[in-house]
Image (cartoon, grey):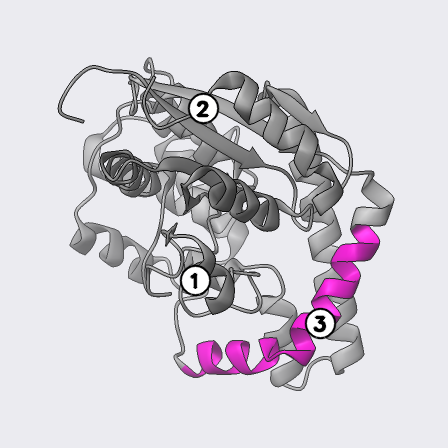
Amino acid sequence: MSDNAQFHVVIVAGPTGSGKSALALAVAEEFGGTVINADSMQVYRDLRVLTARPSDADEARAPHRLYGVLEATEGCSAARWCGMAVAAVEETCAAGRLPVLCGGTGLYLKALTEGLSPMPDIPAAAREALRRRFSGAEGSDLHQALAAADPKSAAVIPPMDRQRILRALEVWEATGRSLQDWQAMPPEPVLPNAVFHTILLLPPRQPLYAACDARLLEMIGHGALDEVRALQARALDLDLPAMKALGVDALMRHLDGELELDAAVAAAQQATRRYVKRQFTWFRRQIIADLVIKEKYSKKLEDKIFSFILEKGLTCRS
């Protein structure tokens, strides 16, 4: 921004399948907004169907940003996403539009609204070299290596969480300091002039589980298996974030002949339900919402939600 004026940002948050994307689009259409992605998997262009990215028709109804902007070969940390999101928010406001962030990745939203602890830049070559060195390591061996180098991080990172273990190792090797020490530093704001207004969708859990189960079946019918087949053909590192998208592992096992399709779908549905449960826990503990909607989004809720936005007088600038 060219000045210090405050500006408003609407956040539409909630667990998978709660109707966030439809609500964010409705808000953007009604109030001249731009929908900005805050989902860690929808940043990847490879899995449009399986990650439930907005359709071309939806994107034609209002501007959308940060959807399908990265290759599956790339990583996307909270810090990297924040950098992209800040640019998207500033460009949206500069165009006179209302930023409408939409997503269920709580860590991203927390980083944007509360700031980031200063973290070192890790050279790409060093990151790739470390991953090659540990490419064949079992989870327990990898965790032992972390415990030897950085016992603080090893004490809080589960032994089978390869991605976080590798991150802690690369930080240790690059700086000689524990990841925990870096994360304990006071956060620095990334959008200091923003006023955030959060709408949180928290529908009843059991009906949401059923809706997620049904949606996965629809995804299979609309090409999700072909997406995973194309991704698998690239023989990418399984530690890459895109390879951990919900459903990828189970459907790859089906393509490898390890699981019948019904069993793979059931495994993916179970993984999704577990993820939804974690999202519920996180949002209830970490997010203080301005408006909580305890049902899945539908058009009948628009009067209530739009009235909230009108009462707050939300425009790009105050």
Which quadrant is home to the C terminus?
Answer: top left
Query: In the drawing, does residue 268 fall left or right of residue 99?
Result: right
Q: State the quadrant of the N terminus.
A: top left
The amino acid type found where label 2 is placed reads Leu
Magenta region, main secondary structure: helix
Which tag, 3 or 2, sits closer to the chain's start?
A: 3
Q: Decide which of 43, 98 is in the foreground and name it.
A: 98
- Looking at the picture, how far across and down is residue 195, in whole percent? 40, 18
Q: Which residues are magenta?
A: 209-233
Picture disc at residue 218? 3
Callout in the foreground (3, 2)? 2
First reached walking from the N terminus: tag 2 or tag 1: 1
Q: Secondary structure at mark 2?
A: loop
Residue at the extreme right of the image, as rendered: 206
Q: Can residue 160 be spotted in the picture? A: no
Q: CA distance from mark 2 to mark 1?
A: 23 Å
Q: Give how far apart the Cα atoms at labels 3 and 2 are.
A: 36 Å
Figure check: 254 above or below 93: below
Instruction: Name which residue type carries label 1.
Output: Ala
